[in-house]
Every structure is written in C-alpha cells, then in structure tokens.
Image (cartoon, rainbow, N blue to C red):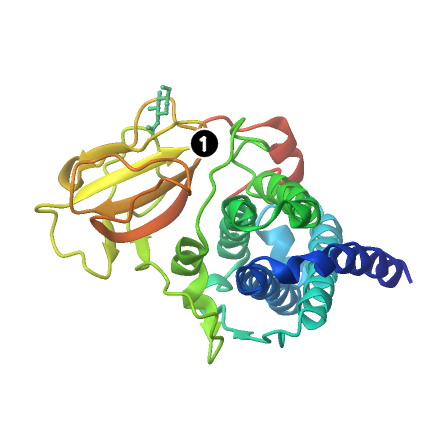
Amino acid sequence: MRYSSVLAVAASSLLVSAAPVRNRDAATNSLVFQFANVLNQLESSFYAQGIQKFQDSDFTAAGFTSSQLVSQVLTQIKGDEDTHISALQAALTAWGTQPLTCNFKFDSALTDVNTMAATARVVEFAGVSAFLGAAHLLPKDLIDSAGSILTIEARHSTLLNVFSGQGSSIPSPFDIGLTPQEILGIAGGFIDGPCDLGLTPTNALTVTNQGAVTPGTLLTVSGQGISGTDNLFCNMIQGGNSTSLNLPLSQCVVPPNTNGPVALWITSNNTPLSNDVTTRSTDGAVAGPAIFFVDTQPEMLGQMVRGQAK
Ligand SMILES: *[C@@H]1O[C@H](CO)[C@@H](O)[C@H](O)[C@H]1NC(C)=O
C-alpha cells in the first residue's frame, strides 16, 4: 500500500511536468529519463541479488552488529529504486518512449558481504553523481522532479557510507557531477545483454592497488587504452575542487588530507580537468572515471553498525 501511493504521487508529479516538454528538446528529456530508468534498475537489481544471496550469518560474520539492520535498510533502498523506476517509466510512456528493461550481472561484486557493501557505496555515489551531472540537460520544469530523486539517492549514499564501517557518513561538503557517458563507463560492466541507450560509455578504469588507498598511496590502474605510464596523466577530483589534480601517471599519489570519494581519470595531456560537467573537456580522454574512497576519518556511527568491521 505504502509504495503504491508514493508511486502515484511520484508518477503524477513527473507526468504533470511532462506535458509542456514536448515542444522543447523531447529527445534529450527522454534520453535523460531513460538513462535514469536504467541506472535505477541497476541499483534495484543489485540489492535484489545481494539480499537474495547473503544470509543473516554472512552479515554478522562480516562484522555487522545486526543483520536485521542491514536487511531493513537495503530493502527500503530497493523499494525506493523500484518506485523511481515506475515513475520514470510512466513519464517515458507518457512521452511516447518505450522504457528500456535491462538485465545485470554482479558476480564480481557479490562474492562476499564486504565486496557487496563496497560496491553498493560506489553505486550510490554514482547515482548521486549521475543525477547531479544530468540536471543541466533538463529543462527547468523537469529539474524539480529529477531533483526529488537525487536527494533520495544522496540519503542512500550516506547509509552505504555508514555501512562501510570505516568511512565518514557525509565525507565531503560537495558532491561530484558526472556525465551519463562517464556513469556508463563506471557501471556499464554490470549490464548483461542488450540495453541500448544510444550513449558511448567512457573507457572503464580500475584502480588495481591491493588493500586500502590512503593519502600517500601511489595509485596503479588498468583500463582500455592504458599500457605502462608513459605520456599518461592521472587526474583526481574531490568534491568542491574546481579542477583535477593532474599528475604524471607514474607519480599518481593520493594527496594529503584526502577523505571520502575521489573520481579518477586518465588523460594523455597535463591539462587539469574541470570539476563541472558542462565544461569538462574530453580532449585527451583515455579512461575513467573510476571512483575510490579514502577513509581517514572513521566515525562512531560506522563503528556502531559494524563493531568489528573487517
Ligand atoms: C582539493 O583541494 C584541497 C584544498 O585545496 C587540497 O588539499 C586537495 O589536495 C585537493 N584534492 C585534489 C584531488 O585535487
């Protein structure tokens, strides 16, 4: 009952704003909502598979003080994602666009509870970044309804930060917007089978360091287009910084005082990247972004949830 009434409200608020849009750039609006529809499906599917795969004992073995606490929150988050999907699909249908339904595989991310929690944290961060980075593509009469999803993704993100047990719940006063192509570069590997958004993902990038990344860590990476470190540059962006820290890839060291999420790109030139999707150049783009978390300020909140986080 609860979800269906929320859904009706959400769908109607999206539909009300759908009407005047057709005269503007209807194709862009549909693309953005279709992208959001797929991203929310990815999240929902991830939680569904995670909830199904792990038993209470897996959560307690991973240090969670209560397995019920985890399943309650993950089920709530999945419910939000499902409601978002229904609302987005209702808007797409009203615009005459067939909503995409995609499949996902998370084998590599569901090997154990810790990997799931770490992946969920990146996925929720990416959810926030995606809505933030796509907002400028929408006409102003759709910003309110899209923004009403963004704020919920941000709450999910906070909870997953807490669930990591090691990090800050709200690690940065600013988030980082990413383009739809960049989000697909991060999450596209989870898509299983056809799911054609008509967007070209950026090349996927992986941080290959073993163990925790901390200030002073020399990052090592792998990704399409990367072989060795010659003539390649790493670019790290933290929320609130106007441009990336651009360093030769062979000297890609996490700067002092870093805490929370960092977006990392590899480029073929030493021009720092803008921390603004509307001005970020793709000249010299090689791969990325990858998202990694630096946890230098553990909180009591995380310790309450994961007494002996491992
Ligand atoms: C972001 O800005 C802060 C403050 O200027 C600086 O200490 C930090 O190193 C910067 N981080 C990156 C990745 O550029």
82 displayed left or right of 310: right
Q: Quadrant of residue 79?
A: bottom right
The N terminus lies in quadrant: bottom right
Residue 128: percent from the left, percent from the top?
56, 45
124 displayed left or right of 252: right
Q: Residue at x 55, y 56 (%)?
A: 113
Identity of the residue furthest to the top in this view: 257
Q: Residue at x 33, y 58 (%)?
A: 202
Q: Residue at x 68, y 64 (%)?
A: 85
Secondary structure at badge 1 equals: loop
Residue 204: percent from the left, percent from the top?
32, 59
Q: How many marks?
A: 1
| Residue 40 in the image: above or below residue 266 | below
The residue labelled by disc 1 is 239
Q: Quadrant of residue 47?
A: bottom right
Residue 192: percent from the left, percent from the top?
47, 76
Given residues 201 and 54, the one toward you in this image is 201
Residue 305: percent from the left, percent from the top?
66, 39
Given residues 306 and 180, the one toward you in this image is 180
Q: Residue at x 53, y 60 (%)?
A: 28
The amino acid at mark 1 is Gly
Identity of the residue furthest to the front in this view: 23
| Residue 217 in the image: above or below residue 76 | above
Whether residue 207 appears in this view of the structure is no
